[in-house]
Image (cartoon, helix red, strand yellow):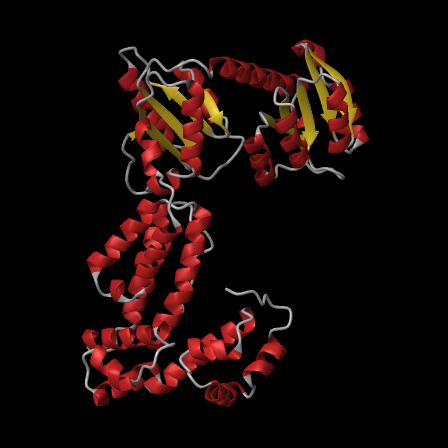
Amino acid sequence: MIKVMVVDDDKLVRKGLISAMPWQNFDMEVVGEASNGEKALEFLESNAVDLLLTDLAMPVMSGIELIKRVRQEFTHIYIVVLTLHQDFEYIQEALRLGAIDYIAKVQLEKERFEEVLERIYNRIAQEQKRATNLNEVYTSDRGYALLSLNKDVGDYWIDEWCEHANQLMIEVDSNLWLWTQPVEQSSELWLESLTQEVNTKSGWALINLIGLYGRPHKDVHRWLREYREKDFFYDYDLDSSMGPILLQEWGCLRQVQSEKSINDLKEQWSSYEWIYQDSLFKHHIDALKMMRLPQAKLFGLLYTLIDKWNLLFYPVSLVKIQLLDSFDFWYQVDEWLINTRNMIRNAMDKPTFSQEVMESIVKAVYIAQEEMNQQITAVNIAKRVNMSRSYFSQCFKEIVGMNFGDYLRQVRIEKAKMFLLYTNKTILWIAENVGYMDEKYFSRTFREQTDMLPSKYRQTLGTGRDMSDK
């Protein structure tokens, strides 16, 4: 007998489900009910329950939080989500946390209760069978994984196709399916049929797996979940098919990246040479992809680089670089980097100046940004960029809009503002680290540019900001 508990803050919904559902027809019995997550947990501590039906939107403790607690403390309990609206984001989160199915309450008015309970009963049977098989090992070396690209839920075409094809498929996770290659002679026709079916469904990818033989089911399932969450982002390409994935290589694909390696890559991208050198640009892209950073860390790195690129390229291009709202796969990052580079190059393509001159001015801007704490002048910068003093000054002013000395002063004052607002460093320390050896001269220059002394600027604009060292 499957012991059932119903959790919903609406008493009428609870009573309606308990009284109207034909529980006995599916060897089920309602043994408890609760109006919120906390009361449900209290009941579970002293009563045996096999199946928990829970609403998502509840006071005191939400359904999502209840699911998390149940998965930690009562791992044997199967969970089905009750939801008033088909909010796919919350449903997806519930399924990711371990719920085996969901029921939209509006459906209960349209379809028979027997169909709902039959679906849940079959899900439980499937989960029980999967749990039994987890310790078994694969006897075939090749398999196939099917996963959703857009994380849709409630798409049951796979079940229908599986029944038609007479093949056993295992749902490893929400919208992540796995099955091994059939051994009968018709396996090639079966694979061709599946491939054609997937091609008619938007938002699905079929992955060819090798290296399954002798591996426990639970290990393969864990690897598949990890692969979808991490490496699939880098491997999937909309315009080209994926090659076979060898399980033994999964652990080698993703390596723990040290802060030093990330900082080294950040330093390479922070320079300007990749704008003009195709081979260097490709090398940087390949190196970034090979690091296979988690998506959140990749986004953080790109945001940091955009800040540096805008400081470096905006003075000579007047183009502001912006990051897209999101990237679903690496190939989109690759396209964005290529488009960003082309945009910068096109903006810096000025008919009155050669590429060599533009590259020299960009280099001068880079030196000003990176070496502002040193004693640099237009004379020595001109030498370093292989231009005469007079021609360098002329080109720099026409391209950037001000002479080099004024630009360097602007860069130093802007950096000083950041130090004043976001650190508690002394005025002397700040002056020396933006290139002024004389604190009084720095303060006078700062006031000329901002109408405030450094101390007054910090006191006026630094209120409420983080004053820790950075």
Which residue is rendered at x = 30% and y = 81% of the image? 399
- Point out the image quarter for the N terminus: top right
Position of 463 with respect to 259 (left or right) is right
The total of numbered circles placed on residues is 0
Q: Quadrant of residue 253?
A: top left
Q: Is residue 275 above or below residue 400?
A: above
Position of 348 with respect to 222 (left or right) is left
Q: Is residue 99 above or below residue 258?
A: above
Position of 85 with respect to 268 (left or right) is right
Residue 40 screen position, x and y as percent: 75, 27
Q: Nearer the viewer, residue 459 or 469?
A: 469
Q: Is residue 261 above or below residue 353?
A: above
Position of 204 with respect to 101 (left or right) is left
Residue 120 screen position, x and y as percent: 61, 19
Residue 362 screen position, x and y as percent: 29, 74
Q: Quadrant of residue 372?
A: bottom left
Q: Nearer the viewer, residue 192 or 148?
A: 148
Q: Can see residue 457?
A: yes
Which residue is rendered at x = 32% and y = 72% of the image? 366
Q: Is residue 309 above or below residue 68?
A: below
Which residue is rendered at x = 30% and y = 23% of the image? 211
Residue 456 screen position, x and y as percent: 60, 82
Q: Can see residue 323?
A: no
